[in-house]
Image (cartoon, rainbow, N blue to C red):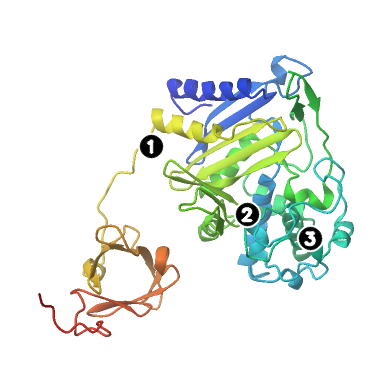
Amino acid sequence: MNQVGETTARALLRRLAVEQAECRVPSLTAAIVREGRLAWFGARGFHDSAGEGDSRVPTVDTQYRLGSITKSMVATVVMRLRDEGRLDLLDPLAKHLPDTPFGEVNIAQLLSHTGGLTAEPPTSWWERTAGLPSDELLALLGPEHTKHRPGRRFHYSNLGFALLGELITRLRGVPWLRAVQQEVLDPLGMTATTERPRAPHATGYAVHPWADVVLPEPEHDAAAMAPAGQLWSTTADLARWAAFVAGDTGGVLSPATLAEMREPATVDDGDAWTSGYGLGLQLTRHAGRRLAGHTGSMPGFLATVWADPADQVGVLFMANTTSGLTYTLLTDLLDILDEHEPRLPRQWRPAPADPALLALTGLWHWGPKPYSLRLLPDGGLALTPVGGAGRASRFVPQDDGTWLGLDGYYAGETLRVAADHLDINTFIFTRDPYDPDAPVPGGVTDWHA
């Protein structure tokens, strides 16, 4: 099964073994995905402490509970609804769910946990008790369950994703889970991902903090709260999900929509963000990587999956313990992979170029500041400040002859090309600094000492 070298596999397994032993995890599995394929799998412990035979050792087909990784799959269906025109991300919730007190919160805010809703539903401890049907949960909600002004800040809300599940149910006319299965799981071949556990599956345990004994955790149907963390899955299926997040969409979403989900909608406060949230996807930075995925936690289970679209690599773990893992396990596994088997960059090859576009390349100036314009292999343009500091953006051609900004300061803005200048949303770039013959040259009429 392993597609890594023996030395690499040993180093990865040792890191996994240290985590399982020192954190006292009943069982722990981990995997690395490269370019859509399961490249390495490791497992330690026994998924059911009632026995110690080989049948108790977890495999890639042993189910664990995903917890909040479920949210990303729910979000994928919401984005499909958006792409079909069934909803807009700026739609207020009242447009689709008029029977809630959160009508002003929009769909994008629910997806990014910026709607200000309470973290947990006003029920008994929902993770450890049987859930309520949607109509009973909705009847319990009131204005007091708004904790922050919508859009003000990130505030994780399990309740918000329960409402997104109900949104899917009403717009699709089928239960949210059926929509997830038909539109996401089945097309991706994730047939071992289910609402409730099926054999073979791990038993969820709480490990005593002061003794080496375990307590089985409860498992139940969360009903209306199920979209927040109900699903069970296997290492093999979660590896396919990692490949999806990395960009192998299988036709479930367009690459552009998946990229939109991976964009940071909100980030942790700081000079440079290290973690944040997109649209149904958690985000983190590590060692130059921008990772997208999700963590998951339910009584007796922990799971996490990360994917790096730039490197086409994914990493995941699944464990049957309520708490105790360090959560640096996955980034450590990536570091080991990079140390032992760094990915080689793609070979450079010459590419044909449109002479008209080739003539655009070279040095341009925004006022006195020099910029370089480079033709990219895919036919796009990259505008980059000379010296590194400044507004850099990539542009892609449009049918009307203009260019659309993809990222940076000019994301979404229009670049228009004239014979002697570039116009980016009224900012004029000229071949010479402040060319007096260009429109709006800046008022400089003569350079002098």
Q: Distance between the residues labelled 2 and 3?
A: 21 Å
Query: Which amino acid, mark 2?
Result: Gly
Side of 10 relative to 421 (left or right) = right
Q: Work out how far the residue at label 1 is from the one at label 2, CA to CA, in angstroms.
A: 29 Å
Quarter of the C terminus within the rendering: bottom left
Secondary structure at badge 1 equals loop
Task: Give the residue number, with chain letter if any, for mark 1.
Answer: 343
Amino acid under disc 1: Arg
Whether residue 116 sits left or right of residue 386 in the image: it is right
Looking at the image, the residue that sits furthest to the front is 449
Rendered location of residue 61, percent (x, y): 67, 31
Comes first in the chain, label 2 or label 3: 3
Query: Which of disc 1 and disc 3 is earlier in sequence?
Result: 3
| Residue for point 19% across, 74% down | 433
Determine the secondary structure under disc 3. helix
Classify mark 1: residues with Cα within 10 Å, few (<14), some (14-19) or many (20+).
Answer: few
Q: How far apart are marks 3 and 1 (CA)?
A: 48 Å
Disc 3 vs disc 1: which is toward the camera?
A: 3
Labels 1 and 2 touching (C-beta < 8 A): no
Asked if residue 295 is positioned above or below residue 86 in the image, the reply reads above
- Per the image, the residue denoted by label 2 is 280
**Looking at the image, do the residues carrying marks 2 and 3 touch, with CB atoms under 8 Å apart?**
no
Q: Would you say residue 330 is visible in this rendering? A: yes
Q: Which residue is drawn at 77% across and 23% down?
A: 214
- Mark 1 and mark 2 lie on one chain; the one further toward the N terminus is 2
Q: Name the residue under label 3.
A: 145
Label 3 environment density (alpha carbons within 10 Å; few <14, some 14–19, many ≥20): some
In this rendered view, identify the residue nearer to me: 129 or 155: 155
Residue at point 75%, 33% (across, down): 300
- Image depth: mark 2 or mark 3 in front: 3
Q: What element carries label 2?
A: loop
Label 3 amino acid? His
